[in-house]
Amino acid sequence: MCIYSNEIKKECRRVHSKLSTTLETDSNGIMSSQMKKFINSFGTLEEAVLQSDELFDTVKNFFPMEEDVSESICLDSKLPASDKFPRTQLLLSGWQMVEENFPLPIQGLVERKYAGYRLTKDKYKDVTPFSPMFAIDCEMCKTSTGELELTRVSVVDENLKVFYDTLVKPDNEIVDYLTKWSGINKKMMRNVTTKLKNVQEELKKLLPQDAILVGQSLANDLHALKMMHPYIIDTSVVYNLTGDRSRKTKLQTLARELLKEKIQTGHQGHCSTEDSLACMKLVQLRLTKHLYYGDAVMNNVYSELRAYPDMGTSHYATSMLRQCVKVDKRVNVIALDDIGQRYKFYVNKGEEVTDVTNVTCIQEKSNKEVIKRFCDSMINFSLNIAHIRIADGQLEGTNPKILKNIDMWVKEIYERSSMSSLVIVLFGGQKHGNGTCFIKLKRELV
């Protein structure tokens, strides 16, 4: 079960053509028992893709499973002491693994697209809330083939101890170490003899049958390892500070904003051990909080921790405020009632603004009242924020009245603002559409 299953199901039709093409092209490669089941249930494989919520919602259809799973069954009521909800609820669904380009062992694809890929185990046990987690990060260098090949892999366990870490000699000659990103240099690789096949064999031997692999955009790492695994927690998916699934948050940003840690700061490139540690800490942090912690897409159902659906985390919601009060400047926030309440929450309770006496939050009942109060008071502050809302219904028609009001409001704000000031007008996208930003610097002509 995945926490985004409903969201993914809504997107099934968008990926239908991609999936149905895959099934039709590789129908001879799908396990005969699976294909027969799909055809008996839905008539055709294409219809199965269209109608079945179960087809790609679980990866068990594609990975070999132990027949006797009685020992791995665990009641949901029983959890590790550190977890507030089952870690299985963070696993990627089959749909998500397809969307994130994870390699899946569909016969036909294995022989053609995934030649040389191996499973992490010959057979897997059912995953449970007690299944162990292992965070993985890989570094790659560019070889004579023009492609990236694995040069280092690091695995960290739940105790934040290095479980496995080795440099890897690519099958082809390295032509660019990509040191700025990989942290790998010629000297490090001089005496390395470990090959990719050795890494695959060692990981296959070391990982438990119900291991949960953790990582940031982990599909890239599994492609580098040329390995496939059914149980995945991807921090680039379960965490999101942008409010948009298509805009992923970098691991460096997640570590800074949520763990209060700085990673990837050196000039010698990334460290796979450091990155895998950060991923494990992020997942462990989520498990100590709640199911939607750190996810600006899903957090609208857990509104206490969000300032406004388009703001992301509290750090982003108040970053400009923090910068102003640090240099002893005053901030003026005027917003509609419910929006203003969100600002007040972070200013007064969120411990994000160090000097709340320099921040004024005023709430008004209508857009018109917000603009009026804003124009009357903004001359007294260094940073002014007016936050209004345009309802969907107000934008209907070819020439909605609200656009004339916006023109009038922007004109009044510009005229009332002082010289040498910056005026920014943001139009947020409606229903996940793109937004627009207009910036104007008001200054005296010379």
Image: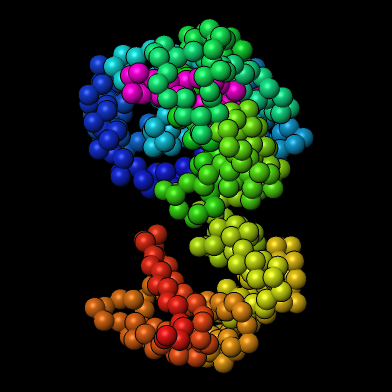
Number of numbered discs visible in the structure rendering:
0
Q: For the C terminus, which image quadrant?
A: bottom left
- Can residue 160 be seen? yes
| Residue 39 position within the rendered picture, expressed as x and y whole percent measured from the top left | 27, 25
Q: Identify the main secondary structure in magenta.
A: strand
In the displayed structure, would residue 336 be above or below residue 436? below
In depth, the one of 380 and 310 nearer the eye is 380
| Residue 423 position within the rendered picture, expressed as x and y whole percent measured from the top left | 47, 78
In the displayed structure, would residue 411 be above or below residue 227? below
Q: Kindly indicate the quadrant of the structure image that contains residue 101.
A: top left
Residue at 63%, 18% (x, y): give it: 164
| Residue 433 position within the rendered picture, expressed as x and y whole percent measured from the top left | 36, 61
Residue at 35%, 36% (x, y): give it: 52
In depth, the one of 272 and 143 nearer the eye is 143
In the displayed structure, would residue 416 be above or below residue 178? below
In depth, the one of 127 and 327 nearer the eye is 327
Span of residues in magenta: 132-154
| In magenta segment, residue 9 | no
- Can residue 61 be seen? no
